[in-house]
Amino acid sequence: MVVKELDTGEYVQRFLSEEEIYRLLSAAKRSKHPYILHLIRLLILTGARKSEWRLARWCDVNFLNQELFVPISKSGRSRKVILSKDAIKVIGEVRITAKSLGLTTDHRDWIITNPRTKKPYTCFHHAFDRVRIDADLPNVRIHDLRHTFASLLVNNGATIYEVQRLLGHHHISMTERYAHLFPNTLADRVEIIAQSIKFAD
């Protein structure tokens, strides 16, 4: 007997609108999970993969340079996640949460520690699932927060090369999935040449 693989369809990239981000964060605030709000905010603010935050230790954060060092990324290479001032603020809030749970935040401790096991969480799927349902966003995946980060960069003028660096893509072909979001500025660019050169009449 031949068993056919279930056709689940091709996943379509999802970019959250400002209103959807607000709904998701509001639902996360109502969650009983101690870290899910912090995690969602960090994913939106940094574009990092959930595993990069799940396995991050306090020693990986360089507060002076505003960077998170990822020893091994999905590509198998190390990378640095650039942290905005808001992301640094959220990390501070994570520390407060950890201490309120009786957890230590020493150099080698995980930033997001499961208070029950004293180890990193194995996953956040159940907590995120409850949040997205509460926010009436049943089709939003946690990885869509990374896509949203990229779309926000594009909408605010970042180049494809800047998006590539910030997402930690080793090959720009990975970043080109967002190419349709970039405005068509080619006509404007060729005008730069005409404006830069004075031709004799």
Image (cartoon, grey):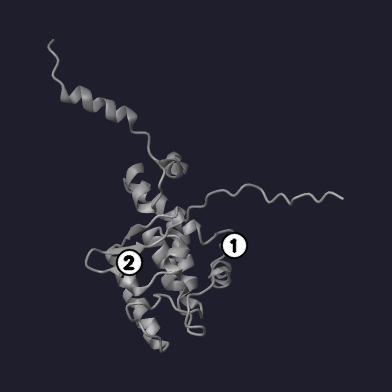
* Mark 1 secondary-structure assignment: loop
Observer-side mark, 2 or 1, equals: 2
Coordinates of residue 102 in the picture (x, y in percent): 41, 89
First in sequence: mark 2 or mark 1?
2
Q: Which x, y percent locates residue 33?
A: 50, 79
Asked if residue 153 is positioned above or below residue 172 in the image, the reply reads: below
Q: Position of residue 128 (x, y in %)?
A: 54, 69
Which residue is at a point 37% across and 62% down the rendered structure image?
A: 70
Label 1 neighbour load within 10 Å: few <14, some 14-19, many 20+: few
Q: Nearer the viewer, residue 97 or 69?
A: 69
Whether residue 130 sits left or right of residue 52 in the image: it is right
- Residue at coordinates 37% horizontally, 77% vertically from top-left? 94
Residue picked out by circle 1: 138
Q: Residue 200 appears at what percent x and percent y?
A: 12, 12
Q: Which residue is mark 2?
A: 87
Q: Residue type at mark 1: give it.
A: Pro
